[in-house]
Amino acid sequence: MSAIPLHPSLQKLAAAHRRRLRLLGLLFFMGMAGILVFMMSFALTHRDMVNLLIFAVAGLVMLPTMALMGGLLWYLERWRTRRLNAANRVLREHTPMSARLAPTGLANRVGTLMAVRPETRARPPSTGAVFALLDPARHGDRAPRSELTVQLYCAKLEPGQELVALRDNGGALLGKLVALDSHRRQTTWMTAAALGLTVLGMVVLAVLAADNYREYQRLNQAQRFAVASENWPRTAGTVRDASVVTSRIRRGKTSVTGYRARIDFEYVVAGTAYHGDRLSFCQPPSLEKQAVETQMTQYPTGARVEIRHDPADPARGVLEPGRAEACEPLLVAAWRELLLSLGLLGLLALIGVVAVWEFLRQRRTFRALANPR
């Protein structure tokens, strides 16, 4: 802390900043503790080695995360302290001038752009209009929406100079003087970057939504084939091989190994030989490998089996017809994933529309400020 006491108006800002940092730290550590408690209870309830390992790894990852968060809070405290000390020097080293701050309608996370209109000529006037970029409004504060009469403290009315504006109610506004062109370029670049990231996210979500839609369509078609296969013609076939194939299936927030029986068989329809490996159209993977191996014992290699085949496409054969109800949970899961991806895509599209509208509004405002009537 500076040896020079802060101006009373800056003391209010310092106290508010400390409260925000303490609240942020409290919320972060409570959130981390809640995640750890949830993962611990989940791992101990299921008593699964995979979940226990995930809990252990998450605990190890959270330790450096908490250290990084502590470092970030320390950095924010130091940065704000230096900012307030610099403003304190401006207040003590320079003589105030009466000025009016008029809102331009441009405000974002960088700050609020205000037009500066000095009411005194104690200092040499600058060439052209003067603009101030005030620090962004914090939680509980509001950006100025109407013209303010303030006591303006700054070295001179030139871009790049730090300023402090004292309001009639004793509040302090911190900021700096900026050139309109440079601020326009900075704002345009930030808006374009945000729009570009939004478009990139939309492309990724569109690809994901298309993949989810194809998966839903595939499962829906498999269910229709399962219903129709009960009435398909029969033919004799021979089992050529039986094996267990694995896949990753979701279980809560993790994924586990699933098992499914693959039965290779061949059959003849109208003198033409066909090969297939479809046990049933709706065959969700199982978590129990032994159950799948038991199912495979019904189809030993070389066994004669009955095959149902699609009369419109004899190459589409199946060992176990029907069982359409097995497709329902798969369809529900695919439908949820599709809705989630479409919802996120729609949200990003809405954000993109807002970003484009804001970009056009900013451009009109900058043109009006650069060419006042």
Image (cartoon, rainbow, N blue to C red):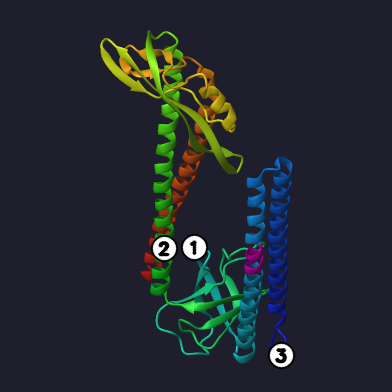
Quadrant location of the N terminus?
Answer: bottom right
Mark 2 residue crowding within 10 angstroms, few (<14) / some (14–19) / many (20+): some
In the rendered image, residue 172, in percent from the top left (x then y), is placed at 64, 76
- The residue at which mark 3 appears reads as 3
In the orientation shown, which residue stands out farthest toward the front? Answer: 302
Q: Main secondary structure of the magenta part?
A: helix
SS for dot 3: loop
**Magenta stretch in the rendered image:** 63-68
Name the foreground residue: 216 vs 12. 216
Work out whether mark 1 precedes mark 3 in sequence or the reverse, and give the earlier one.
Answer: 3
Mark 1–mark 2 CB contact (< 8 Å) = yes
When asked about the image quadrant of residue 218, the answer is: top left
Per the model, the C-alpha gap separating discs 3 and 2 is 43 Å
- The residue at which mark 1 appears reads as 105
- The residue at which mark 2 appears reads as 365
**Residue drawn at 70 percent across, 59 percent down:** 27
Q: Nearer the viewer, mark 3 or mark 2?
A: 3
**Residue drawn at 70 percent across, 89 percent down:** 4
Amino acid of disc 1: Gly
Per the model, the C-alpha gap separating discs 1 and 3 is 39 Å
